[in-house]
Amino acid sequence: MNTESRNEISVGIGTTTHVDPKDLKVNLDPATLKKVMKDYKRLKKYMRSPLYQVKKMDGDEKVITKLMEELENI
């Protein structure tokens, strides 16, 4: 287990400490962030569509189901 100062996240099995968002330093590539946001918006729009609801009822829906399975495997 990695023990560090109280403002940092400790690495271990299910252990974290409170981190103030103002103390975080994150480097994000604007182009990558824009692509992720665009994909997120597209998927949310698809999930609100009647086509998604019909496919979900039929058991034919694969896009969101695949993403949810990948999330469970992480």
Image (tube, grey):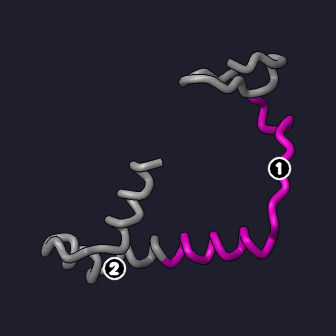
Q: Is residue 24 magenta?
A: yes
Residue 20, x across and y down, in percent: 78, 31
Q: Residue at the left extreme?
A: 58
Residue 43, x across and y down, in percent: 46, 74
Q: Is residue 25 above or below residue 71?
A: above
Which element type, helix, strand or loop, lies under badge 2? loop
Instruction: Provide the residue designation for mark 1.
Output: 26
Mark 1 crowdedness (10 Å alpha carbons): few <14, some 14-19, many ≥20: few
Say which residue appears at 73% left-offset and 27% top-offset: 9
For this rendering, which residue is in front, 62 or 7? 62
Q: Which residues are magenta?
A: 18-42
How would you classify the magenta stretch by its main secondary structure?
A: helix
Residue 19, x across and y down, in percent: 75, 29
Residue 34, x across and y down, in percent: 71, 74
Q: Is residue 27 above or below residue 12?
A: below
Q: Earlier in the sequence, mark 2 or mark 1?
A: 1
Say which residue appears at 44% left-offset and 53% top-offset: 71
Say which residue appears at 36% left-offset and 66% top-offset: 66
Horizontal side of residue 73 vs 54, given as left or right: right
Horizontal side of residue 56 vs 11, given as left or right: left
Q: Quadrant of the N terminus?
A: top right
Q: Is residue 38 magenta?
A: yes
Q: Nearest to the eye among marks 2 and 1: give it.
A: 1
Dividing the picture into quadrants, the one containing residue 17 is top right
* Figure disc tally: 2
For this rendering, which residue is in front, 69 or 55? 69
Which element type, helix, strand or loop, lies under badge 1? loop
Dividing the picture into quadrants, the one containing residue 56 is bottom left
Which amino acid is tagged 1?
A: Val
Which amino acid is tagged 2?
A: Ser
Instruction: Provide the residue designation for mark 2.
Output: 49
